[in-house]
Image: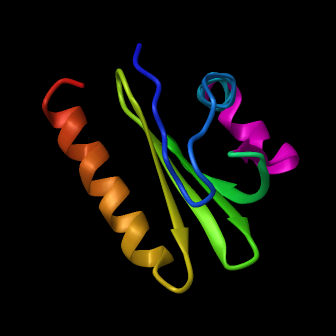
Amino acid sequence: MVLYGQGLRGIATDEELKKFVTLYDHIEKVPAVGCDLEGVHYIVPRTEQNLIFGKRDKTGIFAAKTKSAVLIACYKGENAAEVRVAVEKLAQYLMDSGY
């Protein structure tokens, strides 16, 4: 498994990424506890089947799980909808390709 991430505040640590991946084990509980990435705690207003939506002030994350990957995209400002669409499309492409 390759873990790598660079976002709004720098690079996520291996520990953060490993912990983040485990959120998908009980995704229905994530809104109650939120999620952490790059030293930032995000509230999670909701999750869907394989999606986690995190928010903090005017920044946030969208994460999508495929068979063998978790995509995490960070956004800042008003482009949340565009980032969500991009993450969902890339995740669907990977799933369609067997990943």
Specify the quadrant of the image occupied by residue 58: bottom right
Q: Which residues are magenta?
A: 24-37
Side (left or right) of 79 relative to 88? right
Q: Residue at x 42, y 65 (%)?
A: 84
**Direction top: furthest residue:** 1
Residue 25's place in the image compared with 76, above or below, is above
* Front residue of this view, candidates 48 and 75: 75
Residue that sits furthest to the right in the current view: 32
Give x and y (percent) for residue 54. Answer: 66, 58
Query: Residue most toward the left?
Result: 97
| 12 lies above or below 17 | below
Q: Residue furthest bottom?
A: 78
Residue at left offset 75%, top offset 45% = 35
From what the image shows, is residue 28 above or below residue 84? above
Q: Position of residue 69 (x, y in %)?
A: 38, 28
Residue 93 location, x and y as percent? 18, 44
Q: Is-magenta flag for residue 87?
A: no
Quadrant of the snapshot with the C terminus:
top left
Query: Mainly helix, strand or loop, the magenta region?
Result: helix
Residue 18 lies in what quarter of the image?
Answer: top right
Instruction: Provide residue 31's location: percent of width, then percent of height.
Output: 78, 50
Q: Relative to 21, say whether 87 is above or below.
A: below
Query: Which residue is depicted at the point 37% across and 31% down?
Result: 66
Total number of numbered discs in the rendering: 0
Q: Quadrant of the N terminus?
A: top left
Q: Is residue 55 left or right of residue 98?
A: right
Camera-nearest residue between 58 and 91 = 58
